[in-house]
């Protein structure tokens, strides 16, 4: 009986290293925690999913200011909130996000009336 597997593996290119064909998925945006502006500057706090876990990044339009591993835990979220509040005390303001799908409960839609 003839073994076809032995013949296939002896052919050039069969079972060779395919590392060039395997590409790593880019970092996946999970959430923007906040987006602040000060005069003409902008900074945002973003969580990404990477191959080895989550990563928190402080980003500006020109690049990444800080990156660190991130675990979705109350302590880590409290740190990001504390940083946001500290920046707001120094004059930074919330950036209005027109793409946001989360309605602001303090605003009323045009045409809404209680009377």
Image (cartoon, rainbow, N blue to C red):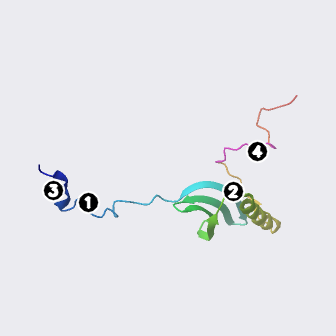
Q: Residues within 10 Å of mark 2 (few under 14, many from 20)?
A: some
The image quarter in which residue 114 lies: top right
Measure the C-alpha gap from mark 2 to mark 3.
56 Å
The image quarter in which residue 29 lies: bottom right
Q: Which residue is found at the position 17% from the left and 61% from the top? A: 10
Asked if 52 appears above or below 30 in the picture, the reply is below
Question: Which of the marked residues, 2 or 3, is nearer the chain's N terminus?
Answer: 3
Q: Which residue is mark 4?
A: 104
- State which mark lies toward you, 1 or 2: 1
Q: Which mark is residue 7?
A: 3
Q: Position of residue 75 (x, y in %)?
A: 75, 62
Question: Which of the marked residues, 4 or 3, is nearer the chain's N terminus?
Answer: 3
Task: Describe residue 19's horizontal placement relative to residue 34 as left or right.
Answer: left
Measure the C-alpha gap from mark 4 to mark 3.
67 Å
Q: Which residue is mark 1?
A: 15
Question: Which of the marked residues, 1 or 4, is nearer the chain's N terminus?
Answer: 1
Residue at the left extreme, as displayed: 1
Labels 2 & 4 near each other (Cβ < 8 A) = no
Q: Which mark is residue 101?
A: none
Query: What span is colored magenta in the figure?
Result: 99-106
Question: Which of the marked residues, 1 or 2, is nearer the chain's N terminus?
Answer: 1
- State which mark lies toward you, 1 or 3: 3
Q: Position of residue 17 (x, y in %)?
A: 30, 64
């Amino acid at each position: 009986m003839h073994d076809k597997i032995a013949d296939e593996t002896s052919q050039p290119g069969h079972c060779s290293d395919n590392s060039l064909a395997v590409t790593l998925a880019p970092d996946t945006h999970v959430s923007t925690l906040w987006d602040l502006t000060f005069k003409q500057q902008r900074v945002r706090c973003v969580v990404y999913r990477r191959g080895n876990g989550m990563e928190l990044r402080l980003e500006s339009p020109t690049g990444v200011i800080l990156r660190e591993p991130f675990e979705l835990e109350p302590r880590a979220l409290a740190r990001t909130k504390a940083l946001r509040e500290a920046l707001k005390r120094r004059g930074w303001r919330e950036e209005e996000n027109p793409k946001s799908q989360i309605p602001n409960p303090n605003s009323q839609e045009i045409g809404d009336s209680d009377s």
